[in-house]
Amino acid sequence: MSSFAQEYKNASHLVLGELQETLDRVDPVMLERLKEEILSADKVFFVGVGRVLLSLQSVVKRLAHLGISAHYVGEITEPAITENDLLVVGSGSGASLFPLGIAKKAKKLGAKVVHIGSNPNSEMKEIADFMVRIPVRTKLYLPDEIESQQPMTSLFEQALLLLGDILAKMIIEEKKLDMKALWAYHANLE
């Protein structure tokens, strides 16, 4: 095996190991509560910035495939949020200005707010109805965060994406959705 091939194998095992440890430490009670909020909301909005937003956009797309009215804040076709809706804020630190501002506005408009992040003591604590904690290394270096050998907050962004896909799978099973029928929601102008 070449030196690069071995390095690749080692890196992939490291990343997958970190992800498994992270997903194992997410509180299933809070995750179930998030699932119930998603299913009971008229519309579900997501907000984040940077790579977190990219992960959340993937979650939005997957939920839309399940027939859920899902949107990310700032999309050109974003509808109005109401008291019957849910805003999911993705922010590891819970201190990113744009998501915080949007969360405050959504709360004023009567929507429920859920924070998916790593820092349980951020400003989001005062805004969110509850938190789903992904307890990984953030820029804050809290003592109970899972260490990562990946750059910056990669582990948070990866876990956020996988958590969305795991929730989608659980929703499919709960609602007994036909996997083949889901293709009716998939883009077809490709």
Image: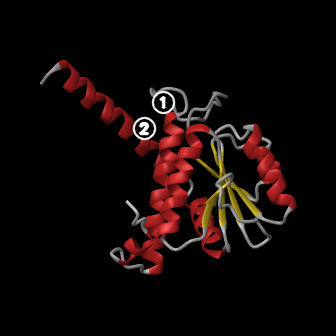
Return the x and y of residue 173 as percentages of the image width and height: 42, 74
Q: What type is the residue that disc 1 sits on?
A: Ser
As drawn, is 107 to the left or to the right of 30? right
Disc 1 crowd, CA 10 A, few/some/many (<14, 14-19, 20+): some
The numbered dot on residue 18 is: 2
Q: What type is the residue that disc 2 sits on?
A: Glu
Q: Residue at x 85, y 63 (%)?
A: 109
Return the x and y of residue 150 as percentages of the image width and height: 45, 28
How far apart, in angstroms, are the residues tagged by discs 2 and 1? 7 Å
Disc 2 crowd, CA 10 A, few/some/many (<14, 14-19, 20+): many
Residue identifier under label 1: 148
Secondary structure found at label 1: loop
Figure check: 173 above or below 166: below
Q: Are marks 2 and 1 in contact (CB under 8 Å)?
A: yes
Front residue of this view, candidates 3 and 190: 190
As drawn, is 171 to the left or to the right of 183? right
Front residue of this view, candidates 84 and 28: 84
Figure check: 89 above or below 135: below
